[in-house]
Amino acid sequence: MRKIQMSRRQFTKASVTGVLAGSLLFASASRAQGKKPLRLGGPISAKDPDSWVKTCKELGYRAAYCPVEADASDDLIRAYRAAADKNDIVIAEVGAWSNPIATNETMRKDAIRKCKTQLALAEQIGANCCVNVAGSRNPDKWAGPHKDNLTRETFEIVVETTRDIIDAVNPTRTYFTLECMPWSFPDSVQSYLRLIEAIDRKAFAVHFDPVNLVVSPRVYFFNGRMIREMFEKVGPHIRSCHAKDITIDEDIYTPHLSECRPGTGSLDYAELLRQLAKQPDTPLMMEHLPTQQEYKLAADYIRSVAAQIGLTFV
């Protein structure tokens, strides 16, 4: 495989406009040491751009999931984009959750149509990326495991499908990304490199969910190595990251790995944050928690790890 060129686009340096009171001096010192302020976000609901900004500020979020659906009016989409720009909030990602490689033809076409629609929304609202999983050949679980998911034939289907989605929209400000998954492409750092080369589109980038790549006890106990390798090999392509955690069941004598709230598992958050600090404006987005209290606990933990290693959040 030829060496991947990592200079397809130089990402914009993180802005520090509007940094929370008391953090500006610390952030400036961090930048002087080559460290970038971090951005954290999570799911919120809001009825309009003003309340959306207010909620983001109350929670200390400087990154957010896309606040509108694709059927929103152009005026509303522009209003949210203007609010994000004015208040230095990065819209991290637009979800396109669907199965564009489904064996059911109707489901497959509907999913591809959704991906194109959501990518167009990401372009319009100025999101860092539009994200989906590659999909699954499982006829019953749209993102589930299946013996055909990691075959050469499926890899080629993923490549052609992704090219079709990107070429239909031809984005210039955003990117289409595939979230890492344990049982479908991309399932490793190496397979993501293969996809970048094979898809060969400037608008294809990387979405990193480290928990989804913890697929064995070896990776579990040394997950910092995997995180570091991901950033070393595809760091400039990473547009958004998910923040979860993972634990291993010690009472079952076959590997049993379970997702859990950040701070209650074994993910190497210190390594993740150190690597994120090298990538300006790459947001860390919490997900899958049942209540806002759980999100607060997760955010508190992530911020505490950052403080321990000399980093800060804008």
Image (tube, helix red, strand yellow):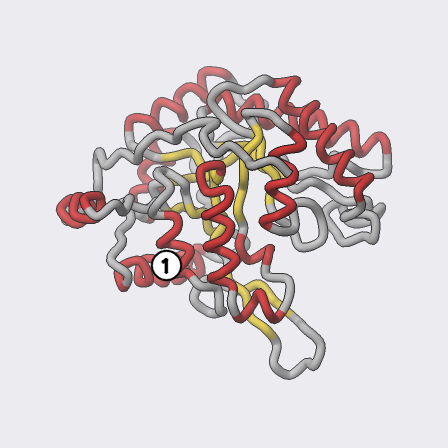
Q: Position of residue 297 (x, y in %)?
A: 39, 62
For label 1, count other residues whose C-alpha is less than 10 Å away and answer few (under 14), some (14-19) or many (20+): many
Q: Quadrant of the C terminus?
A: top left
Task: Depth check: give the residue in front, 51 or 107.
Answer: 107
Q: Which residue is mark 1?
A: 302
The amino acid type found where label 1 is placed reads Ile
Q: Is 158 drawn above or below residue 294 in the view shown?
A: above
Q: Quadrant of the N terminus?
A: top right
Q: Secondary structure at mark 1?
A: helix
Q: At x 84% / y 30%, what residue is drawn?
A: 106
**Residue 120, picture quadrant:** top right
Residue with the most extreme bottom position: 251
Horizontal arrangement in the rendering, residue 185 relative to residue 120 (left or right) = right
Q: Position of residue 309 (x, y in %)?
A: 28, 61
Q: Position of residue 135 (x, y in %)?
A: 72, 42
Q: Is 44 drawn above or below residue 200 in the view shown?
A: below
Horizontal arrangement in the rendering, residue 130 relative to residue 215 (left or right) = left
Q: At x 65% / y 37%, what residue is drawn?
A: 195
